[in-house]
Image (cartoon, rainbow, N blue to C red):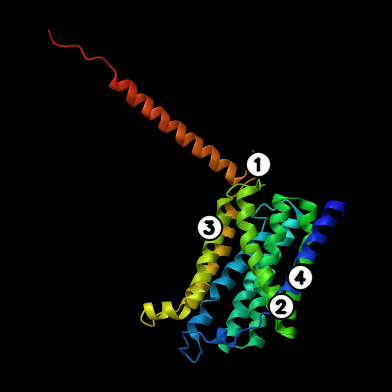
Amino acid sequence: MNKRTIYTWGVAILCFVVLMIVTRAVPQSQEYHDFADKREFLGIPNMLNVVSNFPFLVIGLIGLILCYHGNYFRLSLQGELWGWTCFFIGVAAVGFGSSYYHLKPNDARLVWDRLPMTIAFTSIVAIFIIERIDERKGTMSIIPLLLAGIVSILYWRFFGDLRPYGLVQFVPCIAIPIMAILLPPMYTHSTYWLWAAGFYLLAKLEEAGDKLIYGWTHNIVSGHTLKHLCAAMVPVFLTLMLAKRSVEVERRSLLHKWRISWTKVKENGTMVESYAYSYSNVPVEGSS
């Protein structure tokens, strides 16, 4: 581990300690467990909030199988394979953990809802480090990041404070889209990361509007159920990205590509104006 890496980790830990000192503890509100849709069908309480987790199990298992079946995703780095394996295990586990929680929502069961999501979040960060920054550092960060996520869950459960978990969940939501735009990718189809981030943002908005959406739809479907379905689109897009992508020959960031495209658009617009101007100045011969 070089000095720059030590300095980076030191600054990150210092910022975390300062944040914990200057901010107040954030307890888990019990109102969080009061979801809009409490209907029971086929003997299953809160049925739609339970069964809407099934897509996580399906896509998680599909992704996990494709990681190893003939190396369908063409993962050439060992760290990539480990990272995506942890990610798809976390996604599949959300299908079980979130369903278990929604059968009888409370703090004790919420642990099993959040734990697999945390595994998925932290795995994605490690994958990004491997692909965009440094393969060795990213591979070495998989276990520390997973442990940080697990510790954040345990800290909330035993000390009643959501601040570490909030950092683990929301920092990747901000960092990953920024990294996807600014850092040169190893592979093509980088825009799929932005689609995934967009669906996750939509899922969080639907979660916040749980009861409002339930009213808007005349008690047909709640915001939380839609949140599950939109959040499941995140691993769907990432699985499609893995299936479609290839090694990027010219490693250029999305921002750089967008600048080039914008420059071409402006140049084409200038050329069109030039043609129009030239055409308007063609002399017209009078008839004899």
Residue denoted by label 3: 195
Residue denoted by label 4: 148
In the rendered view, tell whether residue 105 sits above or below residue 271: below
Judge depth for marks 2 and 1 and give the one in front: 2
Of 114 and 67, the residue lying toward us = 114
In-image side of 217 versus 264 (left or right): left
Give the Cα distance between marks 2 and 4: 9 Å
Residue denoted by label 2: 153
Q: Position of residue 123 (x, y in %)?
A: 70, 64
Instruction: Specify the amino acid type for callout 3.
Output: Trp
Which SS class for mark 1? loop
Instruction: Specify the amino acid type for callout 2.
Output: Ile
Residue denoted by label 1: 251
Q: Residue at x 46, y 31 (%)?
A: 267
Task: Categorize mark 1 by other alpha carbons within 10 Å: few (<14), some (14-19), many (20+).
Answer: some
Q: Position of residue 256 (x, y in %)?
A: 59, 41
Q: Earlier in the sequence, mark 3 or mark 4?
A: 4
